[in-house]
Image (cartoon, helix red, strand yellow):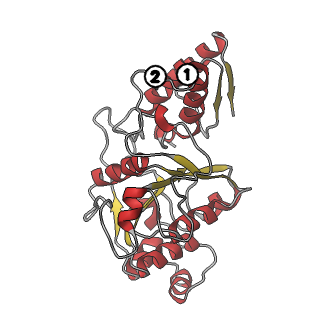
Amino acid sequence: KDHHFLRDMFCSLIAAAVLLQAASMQRGPGEHAPKGLAEPEDGPEWLLDFALGPRDEIPQLIIEQVDGASCTLRVLAFWFTYLPIADAIVRAHARGIDVRVLLDARSTTHKLEGACSTRAGCAHLAARRNVAQYLQSQGVPVQIIHPSARPGPVRSRPPIFHPKAIVVDGVTACFGSSNWYLRALQEHDEHYLCVHSRRVAAGFERFAARRQIAGWSDPHARSNGSGCELCADQLQCNSTGAHHTADAPPQVLDFRLLAGPFFGPESALDEVWQKYIRAARSRVRVVHWRLDWAPLVDDLRLASRLGVNVSIF
């Protein structure tokens, strides 16, 4: 329960809510993004889906995206024991998708759980194996990540590899707060979202590459006969509907305001949050598991004193 839990996600709901609200107060139609923030260079971006657990089916959202992959699949997970998601990854590998999986060591110390639907999955569940053993037995490339600590004071515990994300075909990134174990998926208040964004997807892939997984490669301009060039170049896939065409996005988001994605510990995520909190003019909504980082709290208090409507859940 170290302070890294404060900086564990891609700015999560804090930055997204703050920056979008700040933008609505500061920009008019046709205006450019505020100075210092990025304009899109890699095509249109939009929200594919959003789920709030346990009411919504976060596992189903993840499985649908994995089953819809037609070129590549990258998996980055901290605590992963949920067998139905593992089965979906095995299915992707079996149909020729280029799959790579990065796991924190936590995923090797807990056994598989959840309903099984295949003979191999049921056998590993009965044998109380972990997800890494199951995936590797089916030929899926898996690497256990042991991240290095950022230079600074000696910590009492080693750092952890804390993402919970998938990257599909190099153009879709799904990420959120939920770990992939049974109780988190069925009982916890969590959020998970999928965005169609080559830039965000590439950010996750570069982050994974920095963790030195062998064979991690750029999915663009690759082909396995299933339409990868079309997927990468035209932002379309010939999959089962997991990707929408650029002509008909379901819900457009103004991702031009995002300079990220940001990844710790390379980026000081608290400073990213502070940047957008200080830019807010109307309201800030914070949804967080554990919030005790004093500089962040101070900025929220200051925003409130300046007339910004601040709520913390």
Mark 1 or mark 2: whose residue is earlier in sequence? 1
**Residue lying farthest to the top in this orientation:** 306
**How many badges with numbers are in the image?**
2
SS category of the residue bearing label 1: loop
Disc 2: CA contacts within 10 A as few (<14), some (14-19) or many (>=20): few
Q: At which x and y percent is residue 77?
A: 46, 58
| In the image: residue 42, left or right of residue 86 | left
Q: At which x and y percent is residue 237?
A: 47, 65
The residue under label 1 is: 27
SS category of the residue bearing label 2: loop
* Quadrant holding the C terminus: top right
Eyeballing the image, is 294 above or below 138? above
Q: At which x and y percent is residue 50?
A: 63, 51
Eyeballing the image, is 26 above or below 8? above
Q: Residue at x 54, y 33 (%)?
A: 15
Say which of 258 and 254 sits in front.
254
The residue under label 2 is: 34
